[in-house]
Image: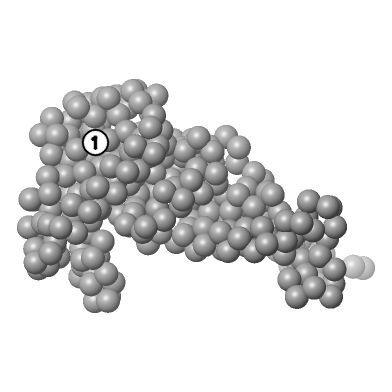
Amino acid sequence: MRDSGGGPGGGEGRVERLRARVEKQQERIEELRARVRSERPRNDLSYVFICTYGRSGSTLLQGVLNSIPGYLIRGENRQVLRHLFELHQTVMRQKRTFKGWINRGEPLPVSHPFYGIDGYPDTAHREFRRLALNLLLRPDEDTRVTGFKEIRWADDDVLAYLQFLRNVFPDARFVINTRNLDDVAQSAWWGEDPDSRSVLERAEARLADIEQELGGSSYRVRYDEYVADPAVLEGLFDWLGEDFDLERVRAVLDVEHSYQPQDDDADDADDEASS
């Protein structure tokens, strides 16, 4: 007579083995679902970026935007996307040297030292967007609008880089945040630099160039104004097409948003002083 008891070879043992197999399959299914989500293009997203300089109150503005349902605005990333921009610029310059071959529809032969570079895809910007979404922005399922804030816009080729960002993130909008320069120049890090005022003036002039280049795709806010009277941010919300909730904004402004150098390595803190 077969034993159906609870020993290792009995019914309970089989149930446990089946349960373990089911759990393993469920984990595999979740892994596959996550992979599908990461590879599926997110064509439903809008993009907003904050352009500013260090100690301008931009982290507070980041918090205000993140209080809007469906917004996910990440913090600074040290302009990591410039690496993709430089990659793209380098390849495109090289491709142009072989435009005769490309215009004739003839691929570079295998014997050519730059074999294959002419096949650099026209879909590069789309691929950059997917990479940025998967690794940097990482939107949630309920995210409608994503982007980041950055304080590093001083490069001479910033307008070309800006156009690259607009190609990668179609219809992106840019919020330009400024603050009274006398106050910024006397704040943390800046106050230790005797040239801080001139550096900040150049940074603000560069933001003015960006604002002029972007036209209606940019909106300027001033820290001193919205801290004194949060209601002035209603114009920003209107521009974004979002409902303005004054009490919600006030609640964000009541929470300290500030960079704390003791949380970082000393080298990283030093870098902030020049931003």
Residue for point 39% across, 24% down: 241
Q: Position of residue 162 (x, y in %)?
A: 44, 47
Which residue is at the front of the view, 245 or 122?
Answer: 122
Residue 29 appears in the figure: no
Which residue is at the front of the view, 251 or 184?
Answer: 184
Q: Position of residue 160 (x, y in %)?
A: 46, 50
- Name the kind of residue labelled 1 in the image: Val
Residue under pointer 1:
221
Q: Position of residue 2 (x, y in %)?
A: 90, 68
Residue for point 54% across, 38% down: 170
* Residue 49 lies in quadrant: top left
Q: Is residue 86 above or below residue 175?
A: below
Residue 222 appears in the figure: yes
Report the side of 199 relative to 69 (left or right): left
Residue reaching furthest front? 100
Residue for point 37% across, 57% down: 156
For mark 1, give the secondary structure: strand
Task: Specify the quadrant that holds the C terminus.
Answer: bottom left
Task: Specify the quadrant that holds the N terminus.
Answer: bottom right
